[in-house]
Structures are given as structure tokens and as C-alpha cells.
């Protein structure tokens, strides 16, 4: 894997330099325009880990902010969850906590440059993810339109998550993609170990576990070994992971709000919100429309992912399971309809699962499915606008303290990136033209100094 990474970095060195420059430009813009609450919370919990250890899993945001030294400035309301999530203790798995604890130890001191430092680290991880995606795409990135479309989509998503949001997703994806590269290289034990660390950063990458297990069942040992990072604190330090479990199960215990516009439960129990408090519920039949559209789409396209009748009938039990792998992967996005708490960027959590398919036609269909789900998410907000305009949307908008002026900041960022790209392309083209002239001169037998 290291050899593949090195070769790919050299192969795309010019593009990676441009990506890093764009990332460095985006970090201060985003830090100024957006309240990156998840990053701020992780910064606070990372600093607190060196004082309270795993006890922080039993403290909610406000309790921890009050317990830390006042001069650290964590009581500014930008480092804690909103009031309707005020009783939630730390809900992320252990590896994510360890990452931010080490990052804040390397660059201590709340505020100042520390938030930019955290985004910088996540940006480096994101650019490594681009290399891993390029490895998994191979030459298709030059030859296949779907591969370029996927790479572009992942680039935008990853840039927002790292430079623009300071979220854990780049780390999850990095370990997830590493496990897929190792699976491709048939290094199953290492792949399982990397996947275990990914799951202990955020749980969604566990969807790849059955595929790796089928490839090499014995390698599950390495997945279990990696989980000791979470098991040991739970068994021997009595760490309370109840908020993590509630977050994973997405019950009303985690949040009384429903922020997933595709959630079928809105059909009969759309919340009534008054002053950011849920006081009741009412039926809203249009809320079921996104699910009906999705079911229709799946019925129309699922045949491609079903095995041939004769091959399935004559296969052994293990063979039948292997033949059903494409169907399993294709059904994964259906889980996005199940949970109450579904933020927009969650829609691309399952994007890297595209590499679990073996056939390009399956990958193209999966990419179409993710696109349809994205449209249904936006459509769900539209058909249930009376609830979202008074419930989740106002709480989402408070992350943009400059309101509509944020759009001007984004325009400035895009313009700056455009100028940067123009300078980069002019420099590269100039260098290429010079190399061509030198090659032609040497071919004519001229001496080039």
C-alpha cells in the first residue's frame, strides 16, 4: 500500500499541490464564516482528555465547559451543542477522541491558531484520501466519466468536511479507504485492522465488514484486536458509552428533533416546535413521498444486482452469499431512511462503498442511486417545509453568524480559488511548453544548456 501511495503521489504531484493550496485558502475563510461546532467540541474534549481522561464520556458539553479553566474561553456557546441537545455527553468513539487529544497536545492552547491547526491536520488527511481514491479508481479516472464524476464529488465533500468543517469524516474515510486498498492487495488482516480503527472513529464504515469477512473469515481476529481500543476503557475503566449508543441508534433519547427529511416517521409524527421546544406532533402525509419514490426507483433498477437464477440455484451456500454481495451493497443507502438524525453530509458517508463492487456497471448504478437519494433529501425538505422552517433549519442557520453575507464570503472564496487555479494552470502549461521545446531541440541535435 505504501508503494502504491508513493507512486500515486508522484503521479498526481501537480494536482495535489493545487489541492493543498486550495485547502490552505479555504481554511481561514471557513473559520471566519462558519461556526464549526463539531470541531470546537472535539477541540474542547481533546484538551479535557489530558485532565479528566475517559471521565469526559460522562460529562455533557456545558458541564465540561464549566469545569475547564475559564480563561480557556470554552463558555462562549460556540464549543457546546445547542440547548435541545444539552444533555448529550461525548458521543464519538474512542479513536476520534484520541486523534483530537493528540492534536491538541501537539499544539496546546485553546483558541488562536489551534482551530486552524486542527483543520490543517484534517486537510492533510483529506488529501491523502484523494490519493487512496485515485489508487482505487486506477486508470478509470482518465477513461471513465463516472470515475471522474465520483472523484469530483468526493473532492467537494472532503474539502467541506476538512477545511470547511473540521469534522471527523476525513479520518474515518482515510482508514476506510486504506482497508479497501489493502483488500484490493489481498492483505486482509491489515485491512480488517484499519477498518476496525475506522469504525472506532465513526461507526458507518462497519458496512464493509461483511465483505472483508467473506474475503478472509480468519482476518476478523484483527478487527477484534483493533476494537480493544474501545473495549478496554469500557470493561476496566467503566466508561459510559450510553450517548454513543443513543447516537448510533438515533432514538428520540438523542434528540427530540427529526432532521432527516426522508424519515418515514414524519408521516404520522412530525414534531410541533415552539421556541426550539418540541411540544407535540401531527400527521403529515406528504412526508412519505420520498420513500415511495425511492422504492419505485429501487424496483426499477434492482434487477441488475440480482444473480442469475441458474447460477444462484446451483451455487453452494457460500457461493450464494457471494452472489448476493452486489445486492447487499446496493441496498446500503436504504439505511439513510431509517434514522431520525440525518445531516446533509451523511449522504456521502456510503460513497466509498462504491469500491466494494467489482463491475463498473454496478458502480455506475450505485452512483446514480446516491444522486437520487441526494435529490430526495432536498425534496423531503421542500414537501415538509412548514416543519423544517421552524425546527431544524433555524438551528442549522445559526452556524453562519453573518447570515446572507456568508454568500459574499463564499463568492470571494470561489473567486480566490479560481485565480489560484488560473495561476497554477498557467505555470504548469508554461513548464510543459518549455519541456516540449527542449525535447524538440534535443531531437534536432541542438545543445541545450
Image (tube, grey):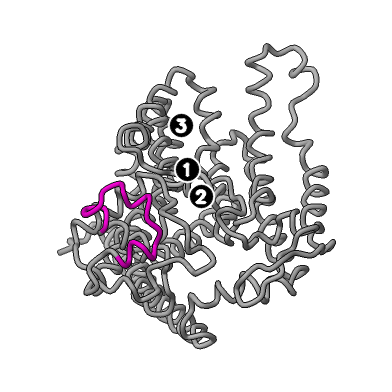
Q: Which residue is mark 2?
A: 141
> Does label 2 or label 3 sit earlier along the sequence?
2
Q: Estimate how packed mark 3 is, as few (under 14), some (14 to 19) or many (20 or more) residues with alpha carbons within 10 Å.
A: some
Q: Is residue 236 above or below residue 49?
A: above
Q: Which residue is mark 3?
A: 184
Q: Which residue is mark 1?
A: 138
Disc 3 element: helix
* In the image, residue 59 lies in the stretch drawn in magenta: yes
Q: Which-is-in-front pick, marks 1 and 3?
A: 3
Q: Position of residue 201 (x, y in %)?
A: 41, 46
Q: Residue at x 80, y 21 (%)?
A: 309
Q: Nearer the viewer, residue 78 or 301?
A: 78
Disc 1 element: loop
Q: Estimate how packed mark 1 is, as few (under 14), some (14 to 19) or many (20 or more) residues with alpha carbons within 10 Å.
A: few
> Does label 1 or label 3 sit earlier along the sequence?
1
Are the two marked residues, 1 and 2, in contact with CB atoms closer than 8 angstroms? yes
* In the image, residue 76 lies in the stretch drawn in magenta: no
Q: Nearer the viewer, residue 50 or 364?
A: 50
Provide the residue span drawn in magenta.
48-66
Q: Is residue 384 above or below residue 288?
A: below
Disc 2 element: helix
Are the two marked residues, 2 and 3, in contact with CB atoms closer than 8 angstroms? no
Q: Position of residue 120 (x, y in %)?
A: 30, 63
Q: Position of residue 146 (x, y in %)?
A: 60, 51
Report the side of 375 relative to 219 (left or right): right
| Distance between mark 2 and mark 3 Cα atoms | 17 Å
Q: Main secondary structure of the magenta part?
A: helix
Q: Nearer the viewer, residue 374 or 168?
A: 168
Amino acid at each position: 500500500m505504501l508503494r502504491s501511495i508513493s507512486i500515486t503521489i508522484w503521479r498526481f504531484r501537480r494536482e495535489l499541490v493545487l489541492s493543498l493550496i486550495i485547502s490552505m485558502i479555504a481554511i481561514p475563510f471557513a473559520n471566519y464564516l462558519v461556526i464549526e461546532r463539531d470541531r470546537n467540541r472535539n477541540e474542547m474534549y481533546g484538551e479535557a482528555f489530558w485532565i479528566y481522561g475517559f471521565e469526559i464520556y460522562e460529562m455533557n458539553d456545558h458541564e465540561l465547559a464549566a469545569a475547564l479553566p475559564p480563561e480557556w474561553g470554552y463558555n462562549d456557546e460556540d464549543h457546546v451543542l445547542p440547548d435541545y441537545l444539552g444533555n448529550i455527553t461525548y458521543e464519538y468513539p474512542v479513536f476520534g477522541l484520541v486523534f483530537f487529544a493528540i492534536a491538541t497536545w501537539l499544539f496546546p492552547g485553546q483558541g488562536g491558531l489551534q482551530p486552524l491547526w486542527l483543520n490543517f491536520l484534517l486537510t492533510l488527511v483529506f488529501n491523502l484520501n484523494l490519493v487512496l481514491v485515485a489508487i482505487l479508481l486506477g486508470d478509470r479516472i482518465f477513461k471513465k466519466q463516472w470515475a471522474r464524476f465520483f472523484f469530483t464529488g468526493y473532492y467537494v465533500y472532503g474539502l467541506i468536511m476538512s477545511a470547511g468543517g473540521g469534522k471527523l469524516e476525513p479520518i474515518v474515510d482515510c482508514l476506510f479507504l486504506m482497508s479497501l486498498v489493502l483488500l484490493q492487495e489481498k492483505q486482509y488482516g491489515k485491512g480488517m485492522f484499519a477498518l476496525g480503527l475506522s469504525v472506532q472513529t465513526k461507526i458507518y464504515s462497519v458496512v464493509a465488514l461483511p465483505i472483508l469477512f467473506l474475503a478472509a473469515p480468519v482476518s476478523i481476529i484483527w478487527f477484534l484486536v483493533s476494537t480493544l481500543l474501545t473495549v478496554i476503557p469500557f470493561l476496566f475503566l467503566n466508561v459510559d458509552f450510553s450517548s454513543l449508543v443513543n447516537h448510533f441508534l438515533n432514538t428520540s433519547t438523542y434528540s427530540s428533533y427529526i432532521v432527516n427529511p426522508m424519515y418515514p416517521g414524519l408521516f404520522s409524527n412530525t414534531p410541533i416546535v415552539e421556541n426550539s421546544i418540541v411540544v407535540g406532533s401531527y400527521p403529515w402525509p406528504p412526508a412519505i413521498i420520498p420513500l415511495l419514490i425511492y422504492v419505485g426507483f429501487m424496483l426499477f433498477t434492482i434487477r441488475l444486482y440480482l444473480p442469475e437464477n441458474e447460477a444462484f440455484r446451483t451455487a453452494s451456500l457460500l457461493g450464494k452469499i457471494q452472489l448476493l454481495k452486489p445486492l447487499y451493497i446496493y441496498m446500503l443507502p436504504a439505511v439513510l431512511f431509517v434514522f431520525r438524525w440525518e445531516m446533509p453530509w451523511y449522504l456521502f458517508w456510503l460513497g466509498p462503498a462504491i469500491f466494494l463492487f467489482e463491475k463498473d456497471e454496478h458502480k455506475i448504478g450505485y452512483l446514480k442511486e446516491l444522486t437520487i437519494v441526494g435529490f430526495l433529501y432536498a425534496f423531503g425538505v421542500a414537501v415538509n417545509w412548514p416543519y423544517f422552517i421552524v425546527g431544524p433549519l433555524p438551528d442549522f442557520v445559526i452556524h453562519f453568524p453573518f447570515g446572507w453575507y456568508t454568500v459574499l464570503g463564499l463568492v470571494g472564496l470561489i473567486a480566490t480559488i479560481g485565480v489560484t487555479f488560473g495561476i497554477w494552470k498557467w505555470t504548469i502549461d508554461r513548464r510543459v511548453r518549455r519541456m516540449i521545446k527542449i525535447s524538440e531541440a534535443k531531437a534536432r541535435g541542438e545543445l541545450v544548456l
